[in-house]
Amino acid sequence: MAEMNLWLKRIRNLVKLKEWWKVLGLKLLKQYRYYESERQLPNA
């Protein structure tokens, strides 16, 4: 999440809100899917 925070600080004044909100949604979805798939792995 620290990387996400840095990205938001860099992009917020460069791109309009509507544009980066779409990208933010995709980034969050990617994170959710990554951690969800890790949770479903059987313990080794």
Image (cartoon, grey):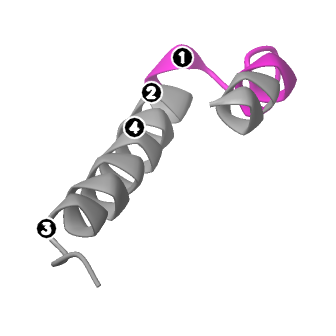
- Label of residue 26 in the image: none
Residue under numbered circle 2 = 21
Query: Whole-Å distance between the Cαs marked 3 and 1?
Result: 35 Å
Q: Amino acid at mark 1?
A: Leu
Estimate the x, y position of residue 34 in percent, counting from the top left. Answer: 35, 62
**Residues at circles 4 and 2 in contact by the CB criterion of under 8 Å:** yes
- Label of residue 22 in the image: 4
Q: Amino acid at mark 2?
A: Trp
Image point (22%, 59%), residue name: 39
Query: Whole-Å distance between the Cαs marked 4 and 1?
Result: 9 Å
**Quick one: 12 or 36, which is closer to the camera?**
36
**Quick one: 5 or 36, which is closer to the camera?**
36
Residue under numbered circle 1 = 17
Residue under numbered circle 3 = 40
Crowd band around label 3 with a 10 angstrom C-alpha radius: few (<14), some (14–19), many (20+): few
Location of the C terminus (image quadrant)? bottom left
Q: Secondary structure at mark 4?
A: helix
Q: Secondary structure at mark 3?
A: loop
Counting residues from the start of the chain, the first of labels 3 and 1 encountered is 1
**Residues at circles 3 and 2 in contact by the CB criterion of under 8 Å:** no
Is residue 16 left or right of 36 when viewed as pictured?
right
Q: Amino acid at mark 4?
A: Lys
**Which contiguous range is marked in magenta?**
7-18
